[in-house]
Image (cartoon, rainbow, N blue to C red):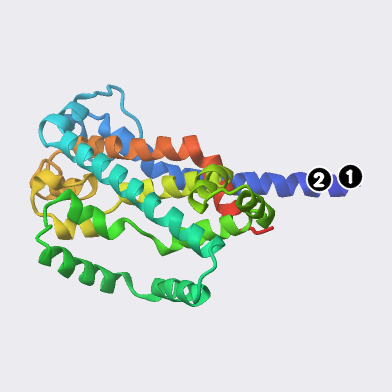
Amino acid sequence: MEMSKKGSRLSKGLIYFLLTVWAVVVLFPFYWMILTSLKDFRVYNTEYIPRFFTANPTLQNYSDAFTSVPLGRYLLNTVIFTAATTGLMMVVIVPAAYAFARLEFKGRNLVFALFLSLMMIPAELVIITNYVTIVNWNMRNTYLGMILPSVTSIFYIYLLKENFEAIPDELYSAAKVDGTSDLKYLLKVMVPISQPTIVTIVILKVIECWNSYVWPRLITYDPNYFLVSNGIQEIRENGFGKENIPAMMAAVVVISIPLIVLFLFFRKKIMAGVSRGGTKG
């Protein structure tokens, strides 16, 4: 019994040690980013050997990040793009998932199978098609041109459909007996019950839009429509990024904080929503 307890403690100690090492490896880049953003520009340039702390932290780099480049404009564009894209996507995918989960129509399973097969198409091909379409519609350098290709998601429709199907059929039958319309049943019954999954989808979409780079970079060349992702690239190439690394890190910190706070605040809902969406019964 004593040997078993020692073996258990040793096993737990090894697990905690490995988790600690992994946590240090994962979190160190964030620590280094924040540390660099707090270093004085002249002090940073005189450090031939990088130091893991700073005795005189400064917030001047954060001031430079907003005054030297239009970082505030990039953030505003990203908020508009993220909010509009996420809102429009929910308007599209919630009725679509409900139709595949509850409505009976001819060829439903075939149509859904075709929908799922679209996930096998390489993203590069979709980008080419979307680019040609947006250019033909004269929507380059517009919010609408950035938003339209992202207002639906086959994966999120599938995730929400699985969640809707897990709701007992007796609720739907009882609602129809009471004369409830499908739209009212969707809004009053299914959406509240599926709230964890819906919240998860919203959060994941917000993160996806905030980090979006390839499509906004491709469809916009006017800095007035840059998002934080391609805005940072612009700062690195044509702003102070090559010379003033601490200010560049300050800009990255400002851009990263909203997503970090969002994930930490809703992490339990994200985990619960994903596991709920993948479990039926």
Q: Which mark is residue 160?
A: none
- Inspect the image, locate mark 2, and give the three-letter code of the amino acid beneath it: Lys
Question: x, y percentage for residue 184?
Answer: 51, 46
Q: Which one is nearer the viewer's eye here, 15 or 228?
A: 228
Is mark 1 in CB contact (under 8 Å) with mark 2?
yes
Q: Which mark is residue 2?
A: 1
**Regarding mark 2 in the picture, which secondary structure is present there?**
helix
Q: Which residue appears at 66% of the width and 57% of the height?
A: 169
Q: Which one is nearer the viewer's eye here, 59 or 178?
A: 178
Question: x, y percentage for residue 268?
Answer: 56, 41
Q: Is residue 34 left or right of residue 215?
A: right
Q: Which residue appears at 23% of the width and 24% of the height?
A: 59
Residue 269, compared with residue 60, is above or below; it is: below
Mark 2 Cα shell of 10 Å, populated few (<14), some (14-19), many (≥20): few
Question: x, y percentage for residue 99?
Answer: 49, 61
Quadrant into which the C terminus falls: bottom right
Residue 186, compared with residue 266, is above or below; it is: below
The residue that disc 2 covers is: 6
Residue 197, compared with residue 249, is above or below; it is: below
Q: Quadrant of residue 189?
A: top right
Q: Which residue appears at 71% of the width and 46% of the height?
A: 12
